[in-house]
Image (tube, grey):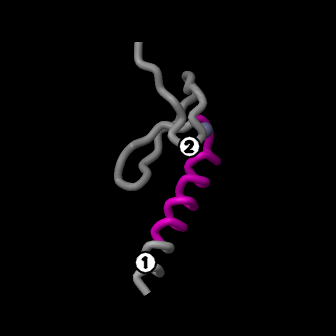
């Protein structure tokens, strides 16, 4: 049996799991808000890397 966890909050996924494309790969999340937080974190990280290069 495959155990899946939300890519954002690490909670267990049930039949209501949602698949979204994030960063070029499919991830499964428990609710629509989860990938939004992930995206923001990813964008912030990307921006930080970009700006840290000067
Ligand atoms: Zn979640």
- The quadrant of the picture occupied by the N terminus is top left
Q: Is mark 1 in CB contact (under 8 Å) with mark 2?
A: no
* SS under mark 1: helix
Picture quadrant of ligand 1:
top right
* SS under mark 2: loop
Q: Residue furthest top?
A: 1
Q: In which quadrant of the rendered view does residue 13 lie?
A: top right
Q: Earlier in the sequence, mark 1 or mark 2?
A: 2
Region rendered in magenta: 30-46
Q: In which quadrant of the rendered view does residue 14 lie?
A: top right
Q: In which quadrant of the rendered view does residue 46 lie?
A: bottom left
Residue at 39%, 43% (x, y): give it.
26
Q: Classify residue 32 as left or right of residue 46.
A: right
User: Disc 1 or disc 2, which is closer to the eye?
Assistant: 1
Residue that badge 2 annotates: 8
Residue that badge 1 annotates: 50
| Disc number placed over residue 24 in the picture, else none | none
Q: Vertically, is 49 above or below 8?
A: below
Q: x, y percentage for residue 7?
A: 51, 40
Q: x, y percentage for residue 2?
A: 41, 18
Residues under labels 1 and 2: Cα distance? 23 Å
Q: Is mark 2 within 8 Å of ligand 1?
A: yes
Magenta stretch prevailing secondary structure? helix
Residue at 51%, 30% (x, y): give it.
5
Q: Is residue 25 magenta?
A: no
Neighbor class of circle 1 (other Cα within 10 Å; few <14, some 14-19, many 20+) is: few
Q: Vertically, is 47 above or below 12?
A: below
């Amino acid at each position: 049996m495959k155990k899946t966890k939300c890519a954002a909050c690490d909670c267990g996924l049930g039949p209501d799991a949602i698949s979204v494309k994030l960063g070029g790969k499919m991830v499964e999340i428990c609710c629509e808000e989860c990938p939004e937080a992930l995206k923001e974190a990813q964008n912030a990280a990307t921006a930080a890397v970009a700006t840290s290069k000067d």
